[in-house]
Image (cartoon, rainbow, N blue to C red):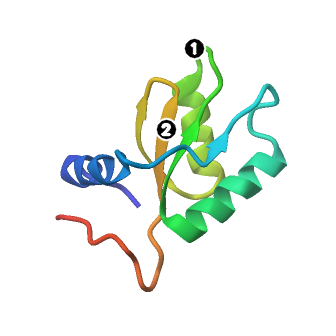
């Protein structure tokens, strides 16, 4: 799924009040972390994750999104916003 700028802006606004549900540790993207991200995004559709400190934050965020087949909406500092829409009964109706 590819998001356009209006859809990303909408999702960023929806994620503003959310707290990070997964925090990456020193091990980075381990199998346990990927499984937790997948479970969280399956339930919530839109989640925030807290990334490791370092210069590779955007790469970490993109790897996490690719690992769970989600879209990377944005990265702000050490926080990444991921979105994966459910096939049925989605909470979010994206603008065109």
Q: CA distance from mark 1 to mark 2?
A: 14 Å
Residue 59 lies left or right of residue 33; in this view the side is left
Q: Where is residue 4 drawn, in percent x and y?
A: 25, 51
Q: Where is residue 18 drawn, in percent x and y?
A: 44, 49
For the point 66% across and 54% down, the residue is 37
Residue placed most toward the observer, 65 or 35? 35
Q: Which mark is residue 41?
A: none
Secondary structure under the numbered disc 1 in the rendered image: loop
**Quadrant housing the N terminus:** bottom left
Name the residue at the bottom extreme.
Answer: 88
**Quadrant housing the C terminus:** bottom left
For the point 67% across and 64% down, the residue is 39
- Relative vertical location of residue 55 with respect to residue 72 in this rendering, above or below: above
- Relative vertical location of residue 90 with respect to residue 5 in this rendering, above or below: below
Residue placed most toward the observer, 11 or 65? 11
Q: Earlier in the sequence, mark 1 or mark 2?
A: 1
- Estimate how packed mark 2 is, as few (under 14), some (14 to 19) or many (20 or more) residues with alpha carbons within 10 Å: many
Secondary structure under the numbered disc 2 in the rendered image: strand
- Relative vertical location of residue 17 with respect to residue 60 in this rendering, above or below: below
For the point 82% across and 30% down, the residue is 27
- Give the total of numbered labels: 2
Q: Is label 1 in contact with label 2 (beta carbons under 8 Å)? A: no
Residue holding disc 1: 55
Q: Where is residue 49 drawn, in percent x and y?
A: 57, 42
Q: Which mark is residue 80?
A: 2
Q: Nearer the viewer, mark 1 or mark 2?
A: 2
- Estimate how packed mark 1 is, as few (under 14), some (14 to 19) or many (20 or more) residues with alpha carbons within 10 Å: few
Q: Where is residue 93 drawn, in percent x and y?
A: 27, 72
């Amino acid at each position: 799924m590819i998001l356009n700028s209006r859809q990303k802006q909408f999702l960023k606004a929806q994620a503003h009040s959310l707290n990070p549900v997964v925090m990456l540790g020193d091990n980075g993207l381990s199998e346990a972390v990927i499984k937790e991200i997948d479970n969280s995004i399956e339930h919530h559709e839109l989640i925030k994750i807290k990334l490791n400190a370092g210069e590779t934050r955007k790469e970490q965020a993109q790897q996490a999104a690719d690992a769970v087949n989600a879209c990377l909406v944005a990265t702000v500092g050490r926080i990444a916003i991921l979105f994966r829409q459910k096939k049925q009964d989605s909470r979010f109706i994206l603008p065109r």
